[in-house]
Amino acid sequence: MTPVRIETDPAHGGRWTSLRVAGREWLWHRDEPRRSGAVPGDAFADAGGLEECVPTVRGTPDHGDAWARPWQRAGGTESVDCADFRLSRRIRSDGGRAVADYRLTAEPGYRFLWAAHALLDLSEEARIGIKDGEPTRFYPDGGARWTPCAWPSQPGRTDGLDRLGPDDGTAVGAIVGTSQVCVHDGTATLRMSVEAGGQPVSVALWRNLGGFPEQEPYRSVGVEPMLGRVFDLAAAQDGDAACVPRSGEVRWRLTVTAEAETASETATVTAVQTGKGTRTWIC
């Protein structure tokens, strides 16, 4: 058994910069010089990794309000203060799983979306594992409109959303009504799940096979456990967004495990501050 290694960068939006388990690095990256200097209100600077997108993914602010703010660190907890809420997380181990426990505090009635915007480094043979038939909202472009379908069907095409394949110049999104997903690539499988009592949970997919952006497109695949059922908070109908109850807080949990054909990946947790200001979690 080998450890799950998670690195985060509190100084730059709390981004997860590494998720290493089952003998490989799972997070995809790209050179994006704007990322290190991003400030609230900037257009999203896509450097890859896993971004904490809250209180929206698409819309305003672009990819949310937390990714462009410095986070604070106190003991094993990292947190960020935004205009309308405070978000905290604690990454630890629990029975061999890497677990991130989240807490958002805000005024009762505050509505929000959250996504663990994980861009994964996957081969053309990778497959997204979700139970067939799960209700799916298919987004054919970067807007707010969607078409209902059943996973893994892709309206207008014969190939399913679960298969990646070579670049074909498309870029689509989907939100699936499930709390868990697995990603199979070669001999390794990554599993992610989200739990949030009383709140809507789902898994979002960003399947960009060289179709985005219009100028200088690149390939990127996002598999994103989330709270909510839409990409843009402004488009949320009743039940589409998380809502802060009378207690003034919402808690949820993201669990990550992985395995290869030869071993299951488990471990204990340790936190180490590196000289570059990142935090490394060995789970």
Image (spheres, rainbow, N blue to C red):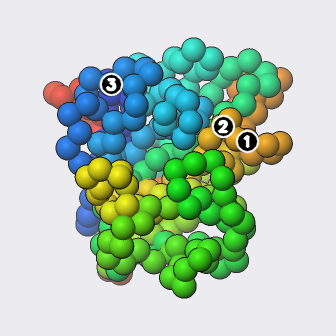
- Percent of width and height locating residue 259: 39, 71
Return the residue at label 2.
233
Return the residue at label 3.
38
Dot 2 or dot 3: first in sequence order is: 3
- Badge 3 marks a residue whose secondary structure is loop
Q: CA distance from mark 2 to mark 3?
A: 22 Å
- Name the side, left or right, on which 185 lies relative to 171: left
Residue 129: tell me if it is visible.
no
Give, as a three-letter code, the residue at label 2: Leu
Quadrant where the N terminus sits is bottom left
Check the image and report above or below for 213 versus 12.
Answer: below
| In contact (CB < 8 Å): disc 2 and disc 1 | yes
**Mark 3 Cα shell of 10 Å, populated few (<14), some (14-19), many (≥20):** some
- Percent of width and height locating residue 272: 27, 34
Give, as a three-letter code, the residue at label 3: Ala
- Percent of width and height locating residue 77: 46, 27
The quarter holding residue 12 reads: top left
Dot 3 or dot 1: first in sequence order is: 3
- Percent of width and height locating residue 206: 48, 58
The quarter holding residue 122 reads: bottom left
Which residue is found at the position 73% from the left and 41% from the top? 236
Which residue is found at the position 56% from the left and 36% from the top? 59
The furthest residue to the front: 215
Which residue is found at the position 51% from the left and 82% from the top? 159
Which residue is found at the position 55% from the left and 80% from the top? 157
Return the residue at label 1.
236
- Badge 2 marks a residue whose secondary structure is helix
Give, as a three-letter code, the residue at label 1: Ala
State the residue in front, 186 or 127: 127
